[in-house]
Image (cartoon, grey):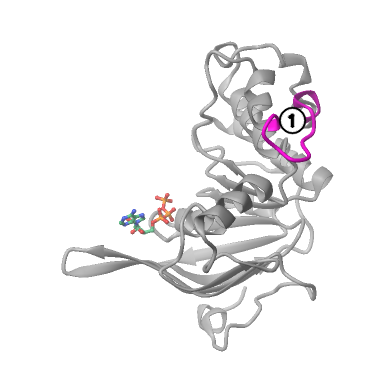
Amino acid sequence: MDSAASARAPPHPVQNGPEREPLFRARDLTKVYPSGESEIRALDGLDLDLYESELIVLLGASGSGKSTLLNILGGLDVPTTGTLTYRDLDLTGANEDDLTLFRRDSVGFIFQFYNLIPSLTAKENVALITEISRDPMTPHEALALVALDDRMDHFPSQMSGGQQQRVAIARAIAKRPEVLLCDEPTGALDVKTGITVLEAIEHVNQTLGTLTVVITHNAVIADMADRVIHLSDGQIVDIQENKSRRPVRSLAW
Ligand SMILES: Nc1ncnc2c1ncn2[C@@H]1O[C@H](COP(=O)(O)OP(=O)(O)OP(=O)(O)O)[C@@H](O)[C@H]1O
């Protein structure tokens, strides 16, 4: 592991990244919230490059800035200072229309809660997105990728939590985004179910080559990643590169 000091050393090194053009390039990102007389530095001078097809696990204590970083990467939020580019698009200088297009075409989100529409079947929940996408797969294809093609006509209430989360994954990836951002995707699930959800994320990453970032509190999950980014107090304190990824089904916790 790198020491915290070297991970923070200027001038903004590319940390453990392979030699190729990054998809995201973040430099000296800060996100500052006013808090009474002082301020909260949710992100505090963060440099990071993320590459196509990587599977990244983002670890850190509560309040370390994980969701803030994920939301900024996904164009849901903007940093206070610093720069963030996605390919040639400057996300820090982008206007609302550009950000909307970026989110719509390039990013899939998965959150702890699935937010499916209860009155629609799995297929219909996915179709809501495919109908407004540029080059989507069919709902059937998307649900097959998460091994739910036999549940297409089920309503959310007829599915387990893990199955509902897999529908949410199908919905997120049906538009073939280049980026999949997952904020505690197993946070509401028991271990066994959580594994089925992580397997679906792993399969999507391997099959579609989607850059995938997974926030978790569970350090065991880190073994499924290409790289593990450790955040503390809004700073990257370590980036660990796994020589090989461990298949999710072999993880035990
Ligand atoms: N909208 C906001 N207004 C004020 N402070 C905020 C806001 N959003 C986040 N924060 C603060 O920024 C810091 C980082 O929050 P963030 O949610 O990114 O952490 P996290 O690592 O994702 O935490 P958790 O694991 O608990 O979800 C925290 O101190 C949080 O209270």
Q: Within the image, what quadrant is residue 26 found in? A: bottom right
Q: Is residue 36 visible?
A: yes
Q: Residue at x 79, y 76 (%)?
A: 19
Q: Amino acid at mark 1?
A: Val
Q: Is residue 216 above or below residue 56?
A: above
Q: Is 135 within the magenta?
A: yes
Ligand 1 shows up in the quarter that is: bottom left
Instruction: Residue 236: give x, y in percent of width and height.
Output: 52, 70
Q: Within the image, what quadrant is residue 136 found in? A: top right
Q: Is residue 57 above or below residue 129?
A: below
Q: Is residue 196 visible?
A: no
Say which of 101 and 32 sits in front: 101
Residue matched to label 1: 146
Query: Is residue 131 rendered to the left or right of residue 233?
Result: right
Q: Is residue 21 above or below residue 73?
A: below
Question: Please, which residue is most extreme toward the right here?
Answer: 207
Say which of 154 and 94 sits in front: 94
Q: Main secondary structure of the magenta part?
A: loop
Query: Is residue 87 rendered to the left or right of residue 82?
Result: right
Region rendered in magenta: 130-142
The image quadrant where one finds the N terminus is: bottom right
Say which of 136 and 60 sits in front: 136
Instruction: Residue 50: give x, y in percent of width and height.
Output: 67, 65
